[in-house]
Amino acid sequence: MRRLFSQPLLLSVLILSLLIPALTGCGAAQREKEAAGLQDTAYTIADPTGDWGFPSPFTHYLRGPGYVRMSYIFDTLLWKDSQGYIPALAKSWEFLKDENAYLFKLQDRVTWHDGQPFTAKDVAFSFNYLREHNYEWINLDVVQRAEAADDQTVKLYLNRPYAPFLEYIAGTIPILPEHIWKDVGEPGQFVQKEALIGTGPFKLKDYSKEQGTYLYEANSQYYQGTPKTGQLKFVKVGSEMTAAALRQKQVNAAQVPPELAGELKKEGFLGLTGGHDYVAKLMFNHRKAPLDNVEFRRALACAIDRQALVTICQRGFGLEGSSGLVPPDSPWYNPAAAAVYPFAPDKTGELLAGLGYAKNGAYFEKDGKVLELELLISSAGSGPGSPSEREGEMIKNMLEDAGIKIDLRSLETKTLDNRVNEWKFDLALSGHGGMGADPEFLNKIIVGTGFNSARFDKNEELNSLLGQQMKEMDPDKRKELINRVQEVYAREMPCLPLYYPTWYYAADKTVPLYFTLQGIGNGIPQPYNKMAFL
Amino acid sequence: MQECVRAKNEPAPNKILKITAGLKKAAFLNYVVALFLILTINFLVPRLMPGDPLQAIYGSEALLVITPELQEELTHRFSLDRPLGEQYLSYLTSLCRGDLGHSYYYNTPVLKVISGFLPWTLLLAGLALLISTLLGFFLGVESGFRRGRTLDRVLLGGVMLFSGFPDFFMGIVLLLFFGVFLSLVPLSGALTPYAGHSGLLLVMDLLHHLALPLGALVLVRLTGTYLLTRNTMITTLGEAFILTARAKGCPERVIRYRHAGRNTLLPVVTAAGLQFAHLVTGTLFVEIVFSYPGLGSLLYKSLLTRDYPLMVGILLVITIVVLTINLLLDVFYSKLDPRVAKCT
């Protein structure tokens, strides 16, 4: 002991000698380059979360990026690129209206990663297996049964006409190898090497939960051609560091903060602007007076300057909310339903006067009582662009300017969701993703039962239109129905869409990344479609 | 006469030993009581909340994801359908088996998830405690010995300045300067993924990634030790035994470390124990800044995904680690200062 402390200088030198080479020694960037020299075609994607679970259908975490990591290994019957559906395991498909079934002709000479041939039996098995084991990513109730007509043909019978079938089922359900999964009783616990045998363009070489990293290797036997990228890596990099990581060539692609997107594009990076998948909404408690009156909700809508929310709170990186709910860059957007409530505080006054309110001083009154509403806001936003205190303060100011007294209440996100769920609120600021997916989302967020939904079923026309659009198999007719849904929604205004934040990605130009039409699989708004790597 | 004195004093060492043993037991008992209190609060809080205890333990969001079979199994496992006493007993026995619950986000037992992340936090926090204490002690001794001179003033000013920063802020500053601006160190993680390193190269890679998070923690945390050492050093240097040592003609270096330094060390060790709890909290934030794969990152993720069992499990593990380190330091303290073992 004595010797130890009598030699502090020696000890410090020892510590410093350990730290200095660590600081100045062969840099990570340098080594990364060396590695790149050896693996010419490695492609690295940065992700701020890192770990999204073991990339097998039953074990990835139930969030979009988890599905994307699994999709590199497992193919679906059909897939999507930036324009729409493209063949995957099925080379062609056909809807048999009389039988309410889909007929899929499968690709020839497809093999599983372990060399076994892929057949129609695997497809039929997958659908039956996933349904039996309650596949949580997609509800398969609509599929009545799957039959292999011959080795190359599969027929899927539906319980009822289901418009999003190609999108949600044929284009999302991963096809599993029967010879492996037939003996697996508890798929949630199946994390052996065999659980990673698919037909996809990549094979998983390594996954680290702690480090949040994935390493894929190209499948040279892939039936749609060998991937140009020999190795694909996902690494964990904090969102603030992504731009520096791109510049230092430590990663090839990443989501970047909006402020840096323009700068990176000027420096020669590929700038990718995402579709508007997230919506920030002002929820109304339409089961309670005075918000149960549609005129009153309209009065509030006219008092809120949505463009100012985008310009000031989102610093211009977003789009103004459309009254019809669907974002302007969606193929289902109806411009006629968009600008029903332009910012007009005078109109608010007129509408409120029509409802018997009279202005006394700064605020409106009725029967001697000041018009006062409680606005719940989340103390911290739950993601990039989600509304928080800043947006809450601004909306409070706008409504108070229009003569409505607002009591602002900041709550933890979970508590806010609970209060909304139990209808214990007047107004609440909230938001969610999924706006870029198949228009089934309209049903989920208008009449659905979740706390993100307006849970508005008072309008028979709206209910009927939403019911019809789910059954309409003709895309043009369906578009017509969706247009009408938006018009009725704008008229009823069960909750007010405020803005859609814009998300930005940047990448070097080695792989032409793109955003998938209506998102990867069932609507994941990321530009890492596996087909971009072929 | 002498014999008489000896006879009177003879039983004394035995008595002291007994008392010491008793006190040691009492100190150990304190830790056990503290642990039990924490466990009990941990057990009671979710169960006293209104509504379904399973919902309080797991959160309503998790229950949407968990299958009814698993829900039933969990109710059974926590004995939630039994009286409170039986529940507590089953809670304690399952803890003894290492069962901290089931993480619904990872769909894995909590202990298994935590055990993957804990070593990284222990590496970071352990090294930070060691280096900040040693460096703070060394600088404090040198500074106290040269009180009022240039080195002392520079050190005091510099260290005080750093102590004003929160550790995560220091982390961000270091990361921006060394990582983004100079590109000297990696921007995130604990090792270069898939670089194929092994042996010495792997150790170097680990240290290279560790340098900044460790640097941030050490810079902020050494202040406490430094100031304490410096002040104690100044007081100790005024003691009579130092004068004696000087009069004996002991060299400066020996006086500085063997005489004054060793006496200064005692409060430093106590403070290090107390500081460890703060250090662990600081580590959690620093890990998030550097995307370092430790309990901090895991806790952050469990908060985002509202994985309650995982959150509770992490907090429990951290509590146990902090209690253990304090207990070890208590033992170490009595070894360092023989008076403690005899006189307390």
Image (spheres, coloured by chain):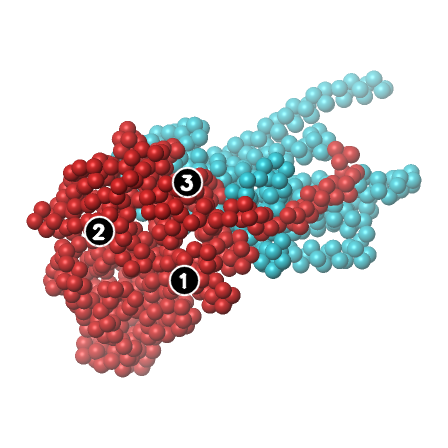
Chain colours: A red, B cyan
Amino acid type of the residue tagged 2 in the rendering: Leu
| Chain for numbered disc 1 | A
Q: Nearer the viewer, residue A483 or B242?
A: A483
Residue depicted at x 27% and y 53%: A86
Quadrant in which the N terminus of chain A appears: top right
Horizontal and vertical percent for residue A527?
A: 38, 56
Taking A128 as reference, is A403 left or right? right
Closer to the chain start, of discs 3 and 2, is 2
Horizontal and vertical percent for residue A205?
A: 44, 39
Q: Which residue is mark 2?
A: A166
Q: Which residue is mark 1?
A: A272
- Kindly state the secondary structure of the residue where label 3 is placed: strand
Say few, some or many: other residues with alpha carbon within 10 Å of mark 3 (under 14 / 14 to 19 / 20 or more). Answer: many
Residue depicted at x 21% and y 40%: A152
Q: Nearer the viewer, residue B116 or B334?
A: B116
Horizontal and vertical percent for residue A133?
A: 25, 36
- Kindly state the secondary structure of the residue where label 2 is placed: helix
Closer to the chain start, of discs 2 and 1, is 2
Say few, some or many: other residues with alpha carbon within 10 Å of mark 1 (under 14 / 14 to 19 / 20 or more). Answer: many
Dots 3 and 2 on the same chain: yes
Q: Is residue A12 above or below residue B164?
A: above
Horizontal and vertical percent for residue A314?
A: 40, 68
Q: Which residue is mark 3?
A: A204
Q: Is residue A375 above or below residue B133?
A: below
Q: Calculate the distance from the C-alpha at mark 3 to the C-alpha at mark 2.
A: 27 Å
Q: Nearer the viewer, residue A400 or A29?
A: A29
Amino acid type of the residue tagged 1 in the rendering: Leu
